[in-house]
Image (cartoon, rainbow, N blue to C red):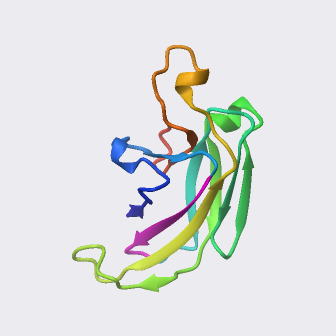
């Protein structure tokens, strides 16, 4: 289970693969797993080439510069993590829970309605966090 902050992301958009995070923001993301994890794997996307993303688990930091079309269309992140809590009752019926957290800091973003022809999206979009690997 991925727990995303409402103040700096749009998880209620209902995208099946993840959620957009606001530009120029820092967010805390929490992941709850029934199995212990050493690493989290996900992809990040950006609509602009002048933005950077810093992901920090407290164990490892990963910097993504969206300076190529390939990275903007989905840059993989492989992040070492350590548990910060366990057995909080978040996963119904799970015998064991392992809780992990990381911060996601986006340097900038884009308002699609202002810069992309035909777009009416007024949100300030920083990065798309793709937790399934299936993209935007």
User: Count the marks: how many?
Assistant: 0
Residue pictured at 60% horizontal, 45% vertical: 23
In terms of depth relative to the viewer, which is nearer, 10 or 134?
A: 10
| Most distant residue in the top direction | 118
Q: Where is residue 28 in the image (x, y as percent from the top left)?
A: 53, 65
* The quarter of the displayed image where residue 25 is located: bottom right
Residue pictured at 56% horizontal, 14% vertical: 117
Q: Position of residue 10 (x, y in %)?
A: 42, 47
Q: In this view, does 96 lie to the left or right of 93?
A: right
Q: Where is residue 113 in the image (x, y as percent from the top left)?
A: 52, 23
* The quarter of the displayed image where residue 31 is located: bottom left
Q: Does the magenta stretch include residue 126?
A: no
Rendered-image quadrant of the N terminus: bottom left
With respect to residue 87, does 59 lie above or below? above
In terms of depth relative to the viewer, which is nearer, 92 or 10?
A: 10
Q: Does the magenta stretch include residue 33?
A: yes
Q: Where is residue 65 in the image (x, y as percent from the top left)?
A: 75, 45
Residue pictured at 41% horizontal, 85% vertical: 86
In terms of depth relative to the viewer, which is nearer, 86 or 28?
A: 28
Q: In this view, does 123 lie to the left or right of 13?
A: right
> Of helix, strand and loop, which mostly describes the magenta segment?
strand
Residue pictured at 48% horizontal, 31% vertical: 122
Residue bounds of the magenta highlight: 25-35
């Amino acid at each position: 289970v991925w727990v995303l902050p409402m103040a700096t992301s749009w998880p209620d958009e209902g995208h099946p693969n993840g959620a957009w995070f606001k530009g120029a923001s820092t967010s805390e993301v929490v992941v709850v797993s029934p199995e212990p994890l050493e690493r989290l794997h996900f992809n990040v996307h950006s609509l602009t080439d002048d933005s950077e993303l810093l992901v920090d688990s407290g164990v490892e930091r990963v910097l993504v510069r969206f300076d190529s079309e390939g990275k903007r269309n989905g840059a993989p992140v492989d992040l070492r993590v350590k548990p910060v809590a366990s057995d909080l009752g978040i996963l119904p019926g799970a015998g064991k829970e392992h809780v992990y957290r990381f911060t996601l800091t986006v340097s900038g973003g884009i308002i699609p309605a202002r810069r992309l022809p035909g777009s009416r999206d007024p949100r300030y979009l920083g990065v798309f966090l793709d937790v399934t690997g299936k993209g935007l």
